[in-house]
Each structure stands twice: as C-alpha cells, then as structure tokens.
C-alpha cells in the first residue's frame, strides 16, 4: 500500500540501489544488480545482516536464498524445505505443488465441517429431501463450472492471487484492490476462523459428553490450531502440502466409513425416509438462495488452487486436471453421505441435530462412535491448513503490486514461504475467533464471496473480447461462465429481494469503503514516514526478502 517502503527498506539495508518508479504502483530496483557497497543479506548473527560484509547479488536480503555467512550461501539439508538453492539464485516462490498435491488441496479444503454440520440447515430451508438433494447436486455442478472457468483464467495468468490477478488483467487496479481489501481483511480470515471454531468445537466435545463445551475452551483450542497451522505453513511448502495430503486421505477414510455404514443400513431395508422425497418442498426464491448458501459453504474451496498458481508444477496441465479430478470426487462423496444420513435419521432428526455426523455415529457405530467427532476434527484441521496455504498467497500477490504493505510480499530467504502474509492472515483470523460466532461469519462470507465469484466470470468474458489472441492453454465454452454469472447474480440479489436486512448493506459498504484507502495511498501514492523503518525491522526479524517479481 505504501509505495516508498520498498525503496526505503532496500536503501537502509543494501545502500543505494538506483531505484526508479514504475507504473506508479511501486518502487522497484534492477534485477540482477548489486545491492551496493553496504552489507546485504540475511545472516546468522546480525538479525538479518550478513556476517562477512559481502554484497548479495540478484536482489537484496538474501541473494542465494540461504543464510549469508562470510558471503557464502549456507547449504540447506532439510528435505522438507525442498532442494538446495543454487549459488546466487534469486529469491522466489518455488514450484512444488504437483497433481496429487493439487487434488489434495482442492478436496482437502472443500471437505471441511460443512458436510458434517450443514445438511440440517440446507434441509430446513428446502423443506424436503428431494429438493435438498437437488440443491446439493446443483452446488456441486456450479462449483465445477466455476472452477473450470477459473482454470482458463489461471492458465492465462499464472500469477498467484486468483481473483486479484484476474481483476488486475480485466478491470485494472481499483477493482483488484477492493477484492484484496475485502478478502484479506475479512473473507479469507473469516473462512479460517469458521473452520477453526468448528475444529475447536468437535475437539472439545470428545472430552465433554454431559454438556455443551465451554465457549472459552473452544476458542482457545481454535487459537492453538491457528498457531500450529501457521507454523506448518511458515516452515515449509513441502511440509504444508504433505500435511494436506495426509489429512485429505484421512478425511476420505472418514467419508468412506459414513458411506459404507449407510449402504449397510440400506441393505437392511432402512429406506423409509427416502420415500416421497419432494413432500413439503419450499419453493421461495429466498429460501432456495439461502439453501444454496448452506450447500456452497460445504463446497467452498473449489478455487483455492488458483491462489497458488505460481507454485504449481506445469500449471497449464495440472490446474485443470486437479479441478477435473477433485470437484467431481467431492460431489459424489457429498451425494452418498446425504443418502447415508437418511438411512439412520429422519428429516426432522437431521434438522434438529446440531452435528449430523455425530448423531449418525452414535446410532450406527456403537462403541466406535468416537470416530465421527475425530473425523470431523481431522477434516477441519486439514481444511484450515489448505485455507491458510491459499490465503497467504493472495496477500503476497496484492502486496507485490503495491496494494498492501510491502513487507507482506516478502519471502523467507531459506524456506521460500510468504511468511509475513501468512502471519498477517493468522492474526486477523485469531481476532475473529475471539470475537465472532460461526453463524454470523458464514452469512457475511457467503454473500460477499459470490459478488467476487461473479466478478471473475465477468473478467473472463471481458478478456475474451479485449485479449482474443492471448494464449489460453485451457478454454471453456462461453456458456459456462455466462451460466455461473447468472447464478452468482441470483445468489447475491435473491436473499436481498426476498428478505432485505441491514447486514447486506454493511457488507456492500465495507467493500466500497476500501476506496478511502485506495485513493490516497495507491492512486496518489501518499506515504507514512515511519513505515520504512518498520519494514526494515520486520525484514530483519522475520528473515525475509523481496522476490524477483518485485524487480525489473
């Protein structure tokens, strides 16, 4: 956000770098240029200053990507941190996310607590089993169509940041800034806070059987989960993706337990609740739209892989392949899980149950009923890990373009993780955990998110005409983004028309209020004098440095 910071921090640490302004967005230096005669690099002794006084090449603050000691890059032997950097290799995010990790990121973030909790809310809003099943399937199809549209956008622009990068390409800086403003400060942190509160609730319930778990204990466990997940993501990209792969496999085992249990009850003849599926259906426009909110919350995460495009191996192939594998897999799992629930519970019992999966486990698994709370806990932890993994990259991408504090776009010089952005997101999520409740956070998230999903469809359509010859390794039929756009408009407008509340006005006002900061700090490039010193201090404290993308 504050454009002088980058130049100030480089000058303070590395001497005069002959910086020059570019595009009015950010002060940038020369790629490959020497950092000057002053000390440069991140060191073992000086809180970020190199011991030997030698200048690092190819960017300030780390040069070869290792700790500078006597001017030489120290070797990295921890395999979790990835391969050792080559000598004088500039700092940048590494491509470490393959097809398996891409599918795991999509599936792992989509299957969180929603399918274990929200079937009751969706069933209550639709009024019937048949309509709720239609909405579940429609949500899956909508998520797949939206993700395929995002695949075209993500293969056109392989920069991290998803919607932020696409808005910059199609509309320019102001809409992209508003997206980063709303997403960085509210949407992504609230998503992680919701998931971690769910994790805390189910983790504590395993030890409290006689009454509701104390709220303060739930929040403390949620905060602990945020700290652990933050450490994992700051330590190594490989560790974060490995955790995601393991927890995704574990939650698929939990889903399989529910499906097999339901199949067993069906073979016993317990299908009485599946008869007359459309009885008492609610056809209200508002009810159907809010039912979609409940269902789409369970599917949310279908676009998370687009946030880490810079770290995907061969993104033009692995991005659409991961989407084509992951989202249909989740949709099939959700369909079978809902059928399984109805073999054990009646629709009314599902509506009144606060945790459908736990009730299912108590009735079917007997002494092994504890598996269901454990499964939900595992599922939510994996989902939170994937959410933070993606959210940190949005902050990184927006800051790199000068739309946020420059320190948020810096990368750890040894581990190649955007640790400042990850820490920033985690702090906001922790504040939301302490302050908010799950219901209030979900309502705001669903309404605001679909404004930006629809905006991405408009961006795709705009670039079909403004950039007709731009390379598109993957291209969707034009009807798909049009259909997703129409549904997005319905999901945003429907609830407002059916039941207008002040909360929708608050959400829209918050998004537009970002212009109060955009105009002075981004457009007119105003700055706060002391921010340069804060950037230098944080750069040395966190051992981070600018990436090569910040240079010419």
Image (cartoon, rainbow, N blue to C red):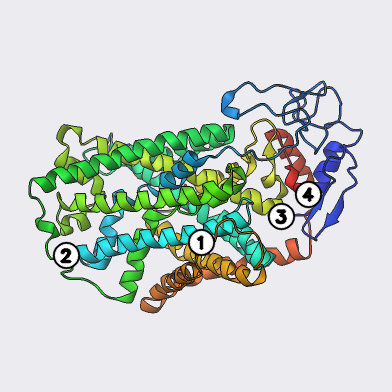
Q: Earlier in the sequence, mark 1 or mark 4?
A: 4
Gap between marks 4 and 2 measured at Cα = 61 Å
Q: Nearer the viewer, residue 508 or 135?
A: 135
Q: Which residue is mark 4?
A: 5
The numbered disc on residue 277 is 2
Tag count: 4
Q: Are marks 4 and 3 in contact (CB under 8 Å)?
A: no
The residues tagged by marks 1 and 2 sit, at their Cα atoms, a distance apart of 33 Å
Mark 4 near mark 2, Cβ–Cβ under 8 Å?
A: no
Q: Residue at x 89, y 33 (%)?
A: 38
Instruction: Compute the Cα span from label 1 to label 4.
Output: 36 Å
Q: Which numbered disc, 4 or 2, marks the residue that appears first in the sequence? A: 4
Element at badge 4?
A: helix
Left or right: 88 as drawn, with respect to 497: right
Dividing the image into 4 quarters, which one contains the N terminus? Answer: bottom right
Select label 2 or label 3 by which is in front. 2
**Residue designated by label 1:** 149
The tag earlier along the polypeptide, 1 or 2, is: 1
Mark number displayed over residue 401: 3
Place residue 404 in its image quadrant.
Answer: bottom right
The image shows residue 308 at horizontal and vertical percentages of 57, 47
């Amino acid at each position: 956000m504050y454009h002088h910071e980058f130049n100030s921090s480089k000058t303070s640490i590395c001497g005069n770098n002959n910086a020059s302004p570019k595009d009015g967005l950010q002060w940038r230096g020369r790629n490959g240029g020497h950092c000057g005669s002053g000390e440069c690099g991140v060191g073992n002794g000086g809180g970020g200053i190199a011991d030997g006084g030698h200048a690092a090449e190819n960017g300030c603050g780390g040069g070869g990507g290792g700790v500078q000691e006597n001017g030489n890059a120290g070797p990295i032997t921890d395999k979790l941190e990835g391969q050792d950097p080559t000598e004088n290799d500039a700092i940048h995010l590494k491509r470490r996310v393959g097809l398996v990790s891409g599918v795991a990121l999509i599936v792992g973030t989509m299957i969180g607590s929603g399918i274990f909790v929200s079937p009751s809310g969706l069933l209550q809003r639709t009024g019937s089993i048949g309509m709720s099943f239609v909405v579940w399937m429609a949500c899956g199809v909508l998520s797949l169509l939206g993700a395929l549209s995002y695949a075209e956008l993500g293969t056109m622009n392989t920069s991290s940041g998803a919607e932020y990068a696409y808005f910059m390409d199609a509309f320019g800086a102001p809409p992209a800034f508003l997206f980063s403003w709303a997403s960085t400060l509210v949407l992504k942190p609230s998503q992680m806070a919701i998931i971690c509160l769910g994790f805390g609730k189910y983790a504590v319930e395993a030890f409290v059987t006689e009454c509701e778990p104390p709220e303060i204990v739930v929040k403390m466990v949620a905060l602990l989960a945020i700290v652990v997940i933050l450490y994992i993501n700051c330590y190594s990209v490989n560790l974060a993706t490995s955790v995601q792969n393991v927890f995704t496999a574990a939650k698929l085992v939990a889903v399989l337990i529910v499906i097999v249990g339901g199949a067993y009850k069906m073979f016993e003849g317990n299908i009485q609740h599946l008869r007359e599926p459309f009885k008492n259906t609610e056809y209200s426009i508002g009810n159907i739209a809010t039912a979609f909110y409940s269902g789409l919350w369970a599917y949310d995460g279908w676009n998370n892989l687009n946030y880490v495009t810079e770290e995907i191996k061969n993104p033009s192939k692995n991005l659409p392949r991961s989407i084509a594998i992951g989202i249909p897999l989740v949709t099939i799992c959700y369909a079978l899980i809902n059928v399984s629930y109805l073999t054990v519970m009646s629709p009314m019992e599902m509506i009144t149950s606060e945790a459908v999966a736990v009730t299912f486990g108590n009735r079917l698994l007997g002494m092994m009923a504890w598996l269901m709370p454990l499964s939900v806990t595992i599922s939510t932890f994996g989902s939170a890990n994937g959410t933070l993994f993606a959210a940190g990259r949005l902050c990184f991408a927006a800051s790199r373009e000068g739309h946020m504090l420059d320190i948020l776009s810096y990368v750890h010089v040894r581990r190649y993780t955007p640790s400042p952005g990850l820490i920033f997101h985690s702090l906001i999520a922790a504040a939301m955990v302490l302050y908010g409740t799950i219901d209030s956070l979900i309502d705001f998230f669903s309404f605001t998110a679909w404004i930006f999903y629809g905006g991405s469809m408009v961006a795709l359509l705009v670039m079909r005409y403004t950039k007709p010859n731009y390379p598109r390794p993957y291209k969707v039929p034009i009807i798909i983004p049009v259909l997703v756009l129409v549904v997005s408009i319905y999901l945003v407008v429907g609830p407002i028309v059916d039941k207008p509340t002040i909360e929708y006005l608050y959400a829209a006002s918050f998004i537009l209020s970002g212009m109060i900061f955009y105009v002075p700090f981004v457009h007119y490039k105003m700055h706060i004098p002391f921010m340069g010193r804060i950037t230098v201090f944080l750069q040395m404290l966190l051992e981070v440095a600018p990436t090569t993308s910040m240079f010419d």
